[in-house]
Every structure is written in structure tokens, then in C-alpha cells.
Image (spheres, rainbow, N blue to C red):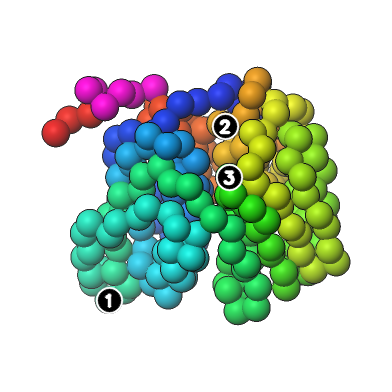
């Protein structure tokens, strides 16, 4: 399955992320998408505030993202969930390594995309396991980012992304992997020109309507959002 993605404008409104194992990935992606536009104002519901969710917010604080936790509620017998409000921000790069990198191993492609929207070099280390298995995720990221005009450096256990350049529309290959497809979509939303994401069917296992949901948030104006 290929996805054609056109550039979008700022994101406004409310949206709930799916529960379950991909909650952190989906929440991270929406925060990155909203933060990359100066005028975004997005409310994200159903975000897990388990240790991984709290660490996610901490990393965004290191990056000077504008995120507020508006509501929290405790799940019966489980971790609390929260409602976040993310606005456009001039994000600065940070380093993800060690325990944090291990915790976010599946989310690393989205953090790499976030690096492209920062004001400097985003360094991600200690993620060598992403090279294992059928897909070398780091190789796929480097290949796609370079096609989209993003400067990127590759290491055996990581990647360095230079921000400050607008992505360029291109044909990129997600290799059937959902996190890769989501990361490429984030870049495509901000790209100059259209992007085709080849083999994007991995999104079906994570959030089948992710692209359409973000497009809907971009299509709305502030005046259309209920008070």
C-alpha cells in the first residue's frame, strides 16, 4: 500500500489516540506534528501517563516543546491517562541515548523525524537493535531523509539529524513498517511538494486512519472548533 501525502497547515482541534501498545508512539507523533507548525493548538486525549508516557513528556520538555497536561484520571487497576495540549514551538535538539533510547526503541523513527524540525543537531545513540531483523530501520531512515533533503549522519548504533531545513517531497519506502511510515508521514506533512510513502501498510497495525486524522485536524480552522 502506498500513501500520497500533500503538505498541510497548522493543526487545531481535539483528537484521542488509540489505547494499547502503540499509545506512546501515536501521542509522540501528534505532538511532533503539532509542534512543527507555529500556529498549532491541538488537544490530545487518552494519553497514557505511565512511566513511558511521563518520560516522553520529559524529553519534549528538554526540547522546549509547548505541552500542557490539562486533565488526568486514574484507570481502574492501571496507569493514569491524561489530556495534553500541544502548541507550535521552536524546538531545540536533544540527545536520546541509554535508558531513554531503550525505552523508546519502537518510537525512535518518530524522534528522528522530530529532529528534522529542531534548530540544530538531534543525536540518537544506543539503538543498534533497530538494525536487527528483516528491516534495518536506521538504514531506512537515512535513505528516506536524504531523499527528502534532510542532512543526516549514520552511526553503527544511531543517527544524527540536522534540523532547520524544510523537507522536500519525494518517494520514500517504509518497508512495511508502521513506525517508519508514521515518521515519513510527519516529514511529508511539512514538505515542499507531495510525498509518496511506498509500502506504508504497517500503519494498519498501529493506527489505520492516522494520515486522514491529521489531515482533518489541519483542514479545520480555529473558527470551526467548538468552544
Q: Nearer the viewer, residue 212 or 100?
A: 100
Q: Which residue is mark 1?
A: 77
Looking at the picture, does residue 108 appear above or below residue 75? above
Q: In x, y percent, where is residue 101?
A: 63, 71
Q: Residue at x 62, y 29 (%)?
A: 191
Mark 3 or mark 1, earlier in chain: 1
In the displayed structure image, the side of residue 57 where residue 152 appears, left or right:
right
Q: Which residue is mark 2?
A: 190
Q: Which residue is mark 3?
A: 117
Q: In x, y percent, where is residue 202?
A: 64, 44
CB atoms of marks 2 and 3 within 8 Å: yes
User: CA–CA distance between discs 2 and 3?
Assistant: 9 Å
Q: Residue at x 30, y 45 (%)?
A: 43
In the displayed structure image, the side of residue 76 where residue 94 appears, left or right:
right
Q: In x, y percent, where is residue 130?
A: 75, 63
Q: Residue at x 42, y 37 (%)?
A: 38
Q: Which mark is residue 170?
A: none
Mark 2 or mark 3, earlier in chain: 3
Task: State the residue lying farthest toward the bottom.
Answer: 99
What's drawn in magenta, residue-wise?
Answer: 219-224
Looking at the picture, does residue 6 appear above or below residue 68? above
Q: Nearer the viewer, mark 2 or mark 1?
A: 2
Amino acid at each position: 500500500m502506498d500513501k500520497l501525502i500533500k503538505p498541510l497547515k497548522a493543526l487545531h482541534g481535539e483528537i484521542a489516540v488509540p489505547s494499547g501498545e502503540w499509545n506512546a508512539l501515536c501521542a509522540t507523533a501528534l505532538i511532533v506534528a503539532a509542534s512543527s507548525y507555529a500556529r498549532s493548538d491541538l488537544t490530545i486525549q487518552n494519553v497514557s501517563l505511565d512511566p513511558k508516557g511521563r518520560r516522553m513528556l520529559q524529553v519534549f520538555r528538554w526540547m522546549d516543546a509547548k505541552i500542557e497536561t490539562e486533565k488526568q484520571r486514574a484507570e481502574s487497576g492501571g496507569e493514569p491517562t491524561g489530556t495534553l495540549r500541544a502548541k507550535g514551538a521552536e524546538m531545540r535538539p536533544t540527545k536520546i541515548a541509554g535508558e531513554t533510547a531503550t525505552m523508546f526503541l519502537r518510537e525512535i523513527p518518530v524522534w528522528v523525524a522530530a529532529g528534522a524540525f529542531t534548530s540544530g543537531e538531534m543525536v540518537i545513540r544506543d539503538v543498534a537493535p533497530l538494525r536487527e531483523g528483516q528491516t534495518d530501520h536506521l538504514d531506512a531512515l537515512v535513505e528516506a531523509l536524504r531523499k527528502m533533503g534532510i542532512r543526516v549522519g549514520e552511526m553503527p548504533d544511531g543517527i544524527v539529524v540536522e534540523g532547520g531545513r524544510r523537507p522536500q517531497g519525494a518517494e520514500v519506502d517504509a518497508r512495511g513498517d508502521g513506525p517508519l511510515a508514521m515518521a515519513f508521514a510527519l516529514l511529508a506533512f511539512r514538505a515542499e511538494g507531495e510525498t509518496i510513502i511506498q509500502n506504508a501498510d504497517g500503519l494498519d497495525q498501529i493506527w489505520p486512519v492516522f494520515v486522514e486524522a491529521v489531515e482533518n485536524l489541519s483542514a479545520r480552522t480555529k473558527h470551526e472548533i467548538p468552544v
